Image (spheres, rainbow, N blue to C red):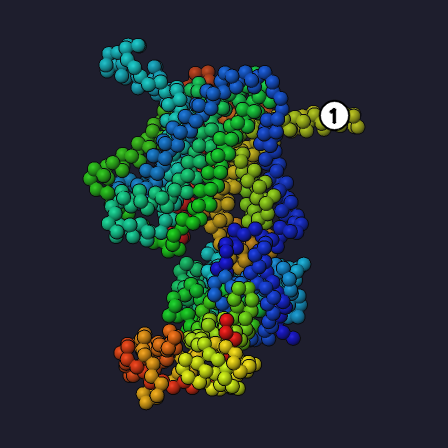
Amino acid sequence: MEVTAPTHLKPDRSRSTRFSGWAVCAVITALLISLPVVVVLAHVFYPSGEVWKHLAETVLADYVANSLLLMLGVAIGTAIGGIGCAWLISMTEFPGRKVFEWALLLPMAMPAYIIAYTYTGLLDFAGPVQTVLREVMGWKWGDYWFPDVRSLGGAVIMMSLVLFPYVYLMTRAAFLNQSICVLDVSRTLGNGPWRTFFSVGLPLARPAIVAGLSLALMETLADYGTVQYFGVATFTTGIFRTWYGLDNAAAASQLAALLMMFVFVLLVLEAYSRRQARFHHTSQRHQDIQRYVLKGWKSLGAFLFCFLALLLGFLLPAGQLGYWSVLVAETQIDGSFLALLENSLELAGLTSVLAVILALFLGYSRRLHRTKPLLASVRLAGMGYAVPGTVIAIGVIIPFAWFDNTLDGWARETLGISTGLLLSGTVFALVFAYLVRFLAVSLQAVNAGLDRIKPSIDEAGRSLGYGPLGVVRRLHIPLLSGSLLTAVLLVFVDVLKELPATLILRPFDYNTLAVRAYEMASDERLADAGPASLAIVAAGIVPVVLLSRSIARTRREKT
Amino acid sequence: MSQLEVCDVSIAYGANTVVSGVSFTLQEGEIGCLLGPSGCGKTSLLRAVAGFEPLSTGRVLLNGETVSSESFVLPPERRKVGMVFQDFALFPHLSVFDNLGFGLRALAPEKRKQRITELLDLVGLTAVVRHFPHELSGGQQQRVALARAMAPRPDILLLDEPFSAIDPEFREQLAVEVREMLKRDNMTAVLVTHDQLEAFAMADRIGVMNQGRLQQMDTAYNLYHRPANRFVADFIGDGALLPGRVIGIGRVETPLGTLEGPTPTELKVGDRVDILVRPDDVIHEDDSSLKLTIVKKEFRGAEFRYTLGIAGGHKIICLVPSHHDHPIGSNLGVRVDMEHLRLFPAA
């Protein structure tokens, strides 16, 4: 009816008042996934004494200031890169546009810490850039000023280069979804391309932009590898230092809790803009976009803008990694390297499939039972993405160790045997931590897909004789296949890249590509870090290309 | 036994009651309609019949079996209802054939194919059986949605604003066509709409709803000529309410003079009333002694729709064959001929 709100936005009284096994299962699953976050948050109330006081008096202000500056810089950087590319790609025509359309996603395959290693190799004193400068100009050490890449500014640039595709992806989708009518209206009212961009296109895409920025900033806050390597004191490095260096779990957890407040702001922002996006669909009718055909210097400018983003975010660092890999191929690529590869692919494959199954389960529960406990617990389960791997690892270790010790104690007492460590230090613990961290990625993809399925589709399925499960199997899964694929691929890439949680939780002697790259780089053996880094990037490319193709396909289906 | 029985049904969202105390029944093969302005509760009521909304009071019976009550909601998939949605809700990943076959999983493949062929024939879509929803026109999509809902031979077919996504000039024609298809299958159906012409074209009986209450459930003719209350009189058709005073049995004094005719309403002499004057009560006669000023004039092709001013600022409407072309401001001779007097106590 034309009453108050669309039905799918209303709490569903028919089921909320009744017991439902499905909803209870969903709440329990969601709570299990959020356990590590809750454990960490619970530690806020533990007295941590002198260490915390010491932190607050000395380094805390630095952590806050550096994290804020980092976020500000990355927000500006990714907004310029992401929105600029999205507008050029979706609204204009220039040579190479079709290639850039998918190629601009490639930097997503490049983890920030790996791009940090390559630019360090490129730009430090012994690197090719400074060497050439010295040879050409005849300078010696100390003769000239050269920006230090291992700095806060450097970290901002590194992260912006690899995180701008998040903004690009979301904004481009928003531009394509915009009714072309409103843009045409703006043009008939005498606004040129620039005016139209700033007065119509940009405001309508704002929710998508904010959502993309929030994702990029969550990544920024969660980064450990880059800031650790560049020696920038932020929350994550602080937590690591407090946990390992000062051996104070409570203080580390309190730092983490403080960090979560930043994260919380981003989550609220993201959720809010997602809600806004609903109302920004101005028309049901979509027409193919009449792109502005750019000519002359404008066309060159557009090309250079996109090319630079691609060159600096992907081509150059990938080339450097390739060069290093060739250099060290003989010594580095051996049986142990293949074992690393296998471990990484196994972990990523297993986690991404599990994550999408869980996301589908939770996403659908949320659609079916819009009850407060369920919505809240699913939201909590989705918070992991914003929580740094470091923190999640701590949140996993604490309850798992408790469980192992309790079970062992009980078994010894009653059965006289020792069960040892069942969970701690296993692949299971690692996969669980990944799930906690990356479930949100697949949840987001699945929910975005589910939101696109009109509630009347569900109701049509129900009235044609299918129960809730039948509707999922016969309607949602086929309709969601694009979103599910996206979910699997995004988690796959994220697991391959994940560093800090892997560092802390991996079973003894169990190495992954990311760990190898980190260890080599930490030993200043940048070239030796090449093959492992290159493998991560290469594996990341395949899903990125598939992702861009599936996006193009859904676009075609729609028109 | 009635095919559909709605007994004293109320629906509420929290403190917001959207349907209160609605009762009506439909016999097998009868097409009913819920008609009313936006927000009157008609769609909520329809969704309650389908099983998508729980009741706060009352009962819904399908084929004599209780499917909804205060404490019980039989899920939609377990009641035999077909539903046609406002946006059609066609499954975008399935062809026309598979959309129609979606609700027929219980049938053997042969039987299923036979039923689908039958339906394609009924709605005239055999030519596009392999097409996907996005390749169809709005009217074709509408017919797929209808055939899909009818496929499992439901006890009742529910149509939620089924023509609102169709171009207005085709709506009435399509409504007539849909009526014919339903009648051919002897299908019991409930239509929800805010468009009375659609309702008139399709339904046997029409329930007019306002603010969650059923005002009157009757044939289109009776709604127009014997409206149960002021709201129905105003909502259905053209017309004007003029103030009057009862001066005798079947005699009312109005600004148009004394009007006479039978009236079912029990009123005393001297009561103040409002009297409903429809355009068809006002007949144009050049030599009538009653002359009224034309204040508005609309050309409708076959006829003019004149709005005539009366003393006291009241207006009535008169439809005149279009060769009677009179300018605005001139006087038009009319005779008021009431078959019956429709009176409402003055507000």
Q: Of residues A482 and A292, which is closer to you in this image? A: A292
What kind of element bears circle 1?
A: helix
**x, y (%) of residue B97?**
48, 63
Q: Of residues B6 and A519, which is closer to you in this image? A: B6
**x, y (%) of residue B23?**
60, 69
Q: Residues within 10 Å of mark 1 (few under 14, many from 20)?
A: some
Determine whether A103 is above or below B134 in the image: above
Q: Tell me the amino acid under the disc marked 1.
A: Gly
Q: Quadrant of residue B309?
A: bottom left
Determine whether B38 is above or below A555 in the image: below
**x, y (%) of residue A126?**
34, 14
Q: Quadrant of the N terminus of chain B?
A: bottom right
Q: Of residues A252 and A514, which is closer to you in this image? A: A252
**x, y (%) of residue B50?**
58, 63
Q: Give me the residue at 48% from left, 34% from top.
A: A265
Chain bearing mark 1: A
Determine whether A154 is above or below A481 in the image: above
Q: Give me the residue at 37% from left, 23% from top.
A: A153
Left or right: B246 as drawn, with respect to A196 = right
Left or right: B133 as drawn, with respect to A351 = left
Q: Give me the residue at 57% from left, 27% from top.
A: A393
- Label 1 belongs to which residue? A409
Q: Residue furthest left?
A: A296
Q: Is residue B147 among the parts visible in the rendering? A: no
Q: Residue furthest front?
A: B270
Q: Is residue A500 among the parts visible in the rendering? A: yes
Q: Give me the residue at 55% from left, 81% from top.
A: B268
